[in-house]
Amino acid sequence: MRIALGLQYDGSLYSGWQTQVNQNSVQDGLEKAISAFVGDSCKDGPIKTIAAGRTDTGVHALGQVIHFDTNVQREDFSWVRGVNSFLPPSIVVNWAKPVPDTFSARFSAFERTYVYAMHIGPCRIPMVHSRAGYLMLPPHQQLDVAAMKNSAECLIGEHDFSSFRSSECQSKTPVKTIYAIDIVSDGPWLYFRICGNAFLHHMVRNLVGCFLQIGQGRQKPEWMTAVLAAKDRRIAAPTFMPDGLYLAKIAYPDEFGIPAPWLQNSWLPSQITKL
């Protein structure tokens, strides 16, 4: 049978989601926990998981979805409680449910939402170290949020996002579709919510870097249009830090009955989690 799990994790301790040689990945920790829970009951060999999004080093998840195949049958609550008992505090299973073999955590998803949380001010906040991005600005200087919002309009729709693509990206095509971009300012906090069908390696962090160039007045809003049209990574801003990036939500067809992520348990503001 095929089991789907909903995960949250603090990615600051990991080299990303995907298993890598001599690295500490979220996938390794989860598969080890599942294998420990099922023990000798599993007759199909090592547990192998497939994720909706392969988050990078230092990137977090509020609504990651994975699936795996197993011959072991357990109640939904038993999967949650049992696997969590073998996981470190930085990873948690929120829900579990059986799904049909036609379901794929990766390929059945039609929409992915990332949130970037950033603190802005003259000094960083040590209590949110590695869990939020940081931009140092003197007290008298403010970001031009209206200009950033204006620059985002050209990104909506289907485009070639090569200018925002890492050289290590393994995607078959740079053409992706962005459905919505929301930028919310809340005192010393700034939040980006970007929703699309799929994302390139480092795409969200590269977009955030460009937005900040515009917000600080170093570039005009129309610069974003020129960067997009150039299809050249060298034209865009440097990749921004991973600390504040969260894989927030994955959307699937209703037929699979995949639960919504537990965003109400996060520290992100309601104007972001309810969008």
Image (cartoon, rainbow, N blue to C red):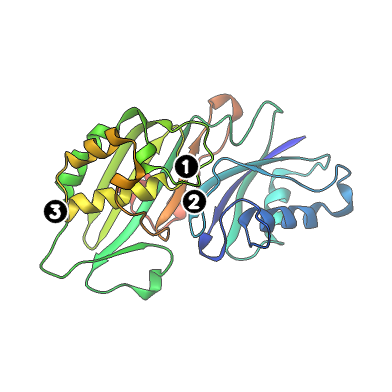
| Image position, residue 55 (x, y; %) | 52, 50
Q: Mark 2 touching mark 3, by CB under 8 A?
A: no
Residue 20 sits in which quadrant? bottom right
Residue at 22% in and 72% down: 122
Q: Which of label 2 and label 3 is nearer to you?
A: 3
Residue at 51% in and 64% down: 12
Residue occupied by mark 1? 249
Secondary structure beneath label 1: strand
Residue occupied by mark 3? 217
Q: CA distance from mark 1 to mark 2?
A: 7 Å
Residue occupied by mark 2? 62
In this image, 238 relative to 98: left or right? left
Q: Amino acid at mark 1?
A: Lys
Residue 156 sits in which quadrant? top left
Residue at 74% in and 53% down: 34
Q: Which of label 1 and label 3 is nearer to you?
A: 3
Q: Mark 1 touching mark 2, by CB under 8 A?
A: yes
Q: Amino acid at mark 3?
A: Gly
Residue at 59% in and 59% down: 91
Q: CA distance from mark 1 to mark 3?
A: 31 Å
| Image position, residue 207 (x, y; %) | 33, 46
Q: Is residue 259 visible?
A: yes
Residue 105 sits in which quadrant? top right
Q: Amino acid at mark 2?
A: Leu
In this image, 52 relative to 150: left or right? right
Mark 2 is surrounded, within 10 Å at the Cα level, by few (under 14), some (14 to 19) or many (20 or more) other residues, namely many
Q: Earlier in the sequence, mark 1 or mark 3?
A: 3
| Residue in front for this viewpoint, 34 or 214 | 214
Report the quarter where the C terminus lies. top left
Report the quarter where the N terminus lies. top right
